[in-house]
Structures are given as structure tokens and as C-alpha cells.
Amino acid sequence: MTALFLGNTTVLNTNAGVKTGSPSVNVGSYGIAFLVNTGETTAPTFSDNAGDGGTWADCGLGAILKNTSADAMWVYVRDRPFGASAITLTYTPGATDTGGGYFVYLLGLSGGGAGGPSRYGLPSIRQIVRQANKASGVTPNPAFAVNALPGNVIIGAVFSGTNGASVTQPSGFTESSDTGYTVPAAGLETVHQLSGFSGTTVTWGSAPASAYCDVIVEIDVGTVISNANLVPPLGQAVNRGATW
């Protein structure tokens, strides 16, 4: 089967507090969210009202810190396919946030019945790795523990202190968003490659002009994972399978 990019939805601004959005989604599609905050490193909550019992959970890395640990990014996944096409997403940050929001990827599979991948939530993630509190002028280059499988989806994000992260996507990747806000300045760029990546290191084409953090995720689209629910110590890479 082939992974399909079905769209994305973003709510990101300098306003503190709860943020909501009401996108149309494909029933049966997969959701993975990048959540960001300035001024707050306590994990936000993220939910929707699809009415199918689905919940969103952290991928196991916790807060990915930037700006001398004052701001953070998180990666959440939904534990089941969307059961409704008209939903409201709700992002609730910690008490001291000065802005932030979310970017959600919507993915599916061709030939996959309702359109979703073969698994959801934590079992859908083969590997995930982060780089935290990186200095300006240094090119993002996070590396997986083992080679990615070429049929899998690779998604990445850079969260910086520049309005619009304004970095060049890695070679072979498609930029999905490059947006941000001011007061304080912050920017989020997201990228994806639906298939064909079989290496370990994802190197961006340029360096952010401010402190940043980054993350890359390998989404499994069909292989059997024998230890899918393992979560590593905070800050370490995830390799969610011993046999492939």
C-alpha cells in the first residue's frame, strides 16, 4: 500500500490560552500533531470531539525544549482513526503560555479500506528522535537509531524563535507549513516524505537564525512491530521494533 497525504490543519498564534479549530477530516484517516508553546514547558492537553472514543497521547519524548528551556514542542498521536468528518480540535496549554498552538498531519493509505494506516497511536511509530536547545546557525540534523524503511512515512518539524521558522526543507522532503507569530517571535516548520527515505539522518537545507528544537518521526505503514508499546527514557530515541 502507498501512504497518502490527505491534508493538514493549523492553529498557531501569539494569544495565550485555549485554542480551537474545526477542520474537515477524512473518516478513517490518521492524525499526528505537533504542539508548541512559548513561555510554558508543561505538557498541553489535546483532544477532539469526533465521538468515536479516540484520544491523543504524547509519543514518548515529552517536552522538546528550545530557547534555553523556556519554550517547548510535543508530538502527539491519535489512538484510532477519525470516526467523523466534522470535528473540533481543542488545545489547552499550561498556565504561563505566551502563545502557541498546533499543526496536525492527516494521513491515509491507498487500498486501505477506510483509508487509514495499519495501526494507530504509539504502535504506529517505528522511530522518533529529537534535538533540544539547539543554537542558532547550526543546521538541524536529527538521526534515527537504525535505517528507516523506504515504504514508511517520515515527518519532521523545527520550532524556532523566528516568526516563520524560515529554514529550507531537507532534500527530498515536502514542506507542509512554515508559519509563526511575534511577541514573542516563534516559528514552526513541518516537512514530510511519504516514501523512499531509507537512511538515518535527516539534514535540513539551512540553519535557523535563532535557538530551536527539532524532531523526526518514522510512521510505520504495514510491518509487524513486536515491541510497539515500549517508551524510552526522556530524551532518548525510540526504536519500536526488534524484528521487521
Image: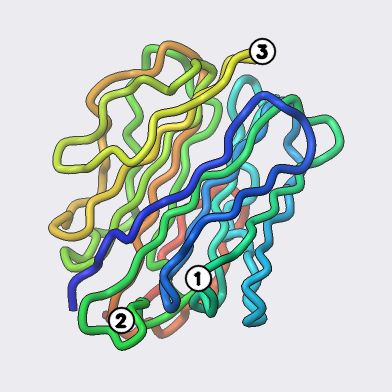
In-front residue for pair 176/133: 176
Amino acid carrying label 2: it is: Thr
Q: CA distance from mark 2 to mark 3?
A: 47 Å
Label annotation for residue 243 = 2
Q: Residues within 10 Å of mark 2 (few under 14, many from 20)?
A: few
Amino acid carrying label 1: it is: Ser
Residue 130: where, in percent of width, then height? 47, 43
Residue 82: where, in percent of width, then height? 51, 74
Specify how the rendered protein is coloured.
rainbow
In this rendering, the answer to whether 59 lies above or below 230 is above
Q: Residues within 10 Å of mark 3 (few under 14, many from 20)?
A: few
Tell me which residue sits at (26%, 43%) in the image: 201
Q: Classify mark 3: helix, strand or loop.
A: loop
Q: Which residue is mark 1?
A: 85
Query: Left or right: 131 with respect to 115?
Result: right
In-front residue for pair 90/133: 90
In-front residue for pair 101/44: 101
**Of marks 2 and 3, the one in the foreground:** 3
Amino acid carrying label 3: it is: Val
Q: Which residue is mark 3?
A: 183
Query: Left or right: 96 with respect to 28?
Result: right
Residue 79: where, in percent of width, then height? 56, 75
